[in-house]
Image: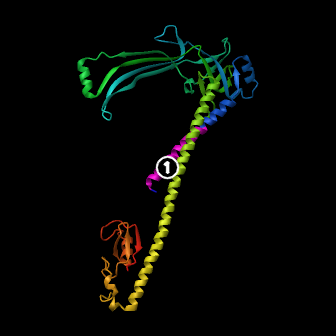
Amino acid sequence: MSLCDYICLGVDTCFIAVAYSLYRYNRRNLEAVKNAPVFEIGQALKSELGEKATNCVPYAVVRGYVKALNVPITSKNVPHLTGVIHETILREHQMRWSWAARWWTDVTKDVARSTDSVPFALMEPYGVVGVRVVDPLQASGLKLQTIHDVFKPNATSAWEALTGFFLGERSKGFQEIERMLPEGTFLTGVGALILGADRQLQLKPPKDSGITYFVSQMSEEAITKHLEKDTRFFKVLTLILGALGCVIVAKILFGYYRRYKQSLETREELGRLRDVQLERLRSRRSVGDSEWPNVDGETAQLQPCVVCYTNPREVVILECGHICCCVDCSLALNSNSRACPVCRSPIVRLVPAYMS
């Protein structure tokens, strides 16, 4: 039992809390998606929402084709390609010297990144009725299609290469990436379905912050399987971390039990030491203080204590094993310096020595 055990227990508890919260979050999303009603976009959907008192379904699934409500965004690199969300990235590729690995490593850094979007809706196949998607960039699962990806290497001179070698950083070139959500992409939206005052259908993030807002190219079944996979992973992770925490707690409790057992043994040993001390006092009273120790008697064979030079040696000091002290001095050493007076080793136990 040490400070390291408590630190490990604290860290494990934090990881358990994080894993369990992620498990609860994914499980709640899974149940919400499974229980969410699926609506087909059309006039019937408007009529159904209009009959509801709140003109709203808190969490529903709709599917449709992407269509811009205003002027769509035109690609800069692909002619005649239009979309509703556009992202451009300028990424620099460098070679840097790693002092830890003692080697040149490839490093990328985004120099510039911009994202543009226009309002869009999920339309029915015939493009008459649509559901406007609100705040699509806040949704989970939306992946933009890469329509342009070109790397342009730098023309490095000998002087620039030499300078970069000594500075530990050399630019290899720039990568231009263009991503877009094109019109006509089939998407699945899961969120709050609302019929506005203008009789327009809208898909918004749900009011319940514990439920995820999805706008994805995946189908409803694929989203469900993905959530099931994440839920199962965090459940297993929580159980593993919990078992590890139980092992750490068991180790700490075993340490307390061992200390308690050692304390009981120490009390018994101290009791035996006091019995030896009382026996010596009785012997001293029976022969008289003037005749103790009697060099002509049997006590002459007992070596005196190295501390007081008065009483005989009566105690074995462990772990070093020296028999050098009487009971009085050994108890004093055990409560003060806790070190053997001969070798200065720490005193672990005191055991009576029965000299014959």
Q: Is 225 in front, or is 108? A: 225
Q: Is 200 in front, or is 175? A: 175
Q: At which x and y percent is residue 172?
A: 33, 20
Q: Main secondary structure of the magenta part?
A: helix
Taking the image as shown, residue 157 lies to the left or right of residue 278, namely: left
Q: Which residue is mark 1?
A: 10
Within 10 Å of the Cα at label 1, are there few (<14), some (14-19), or many (20+) other Cα atoms? few
The answer to whether residue 347 shows anywhere in this view is: yes
- Residue at 39% x, 25% y is 109
Is residue 122 located in the magenta-colored stretch of the structure? no
Taking the image as shown, residue 100 lies to the left or right of residue 113, namely: left
Is residue 13 located in the magenta-colored stretch of the structure? yes
Q: At which x and y percent is residue 111?
A: 39, 23
Q: Which residues are magenta?
A: 2-24
Q: Where, by quadrant of the figure, is residue 203 drawn?
A: top right
Q: Is 254 in front, or is 295? A: 295
- Residue at 30% x, 89% y is 296
User: Which quarter of the rendering shows the C terminus?
Assistant: bottom left
Labels in figure, total: 1
Amino acid marked by disc 1: Gly
- Residue at 43% x, 83% y is 278
Q: Tag 1's secondary structure?
A: helix
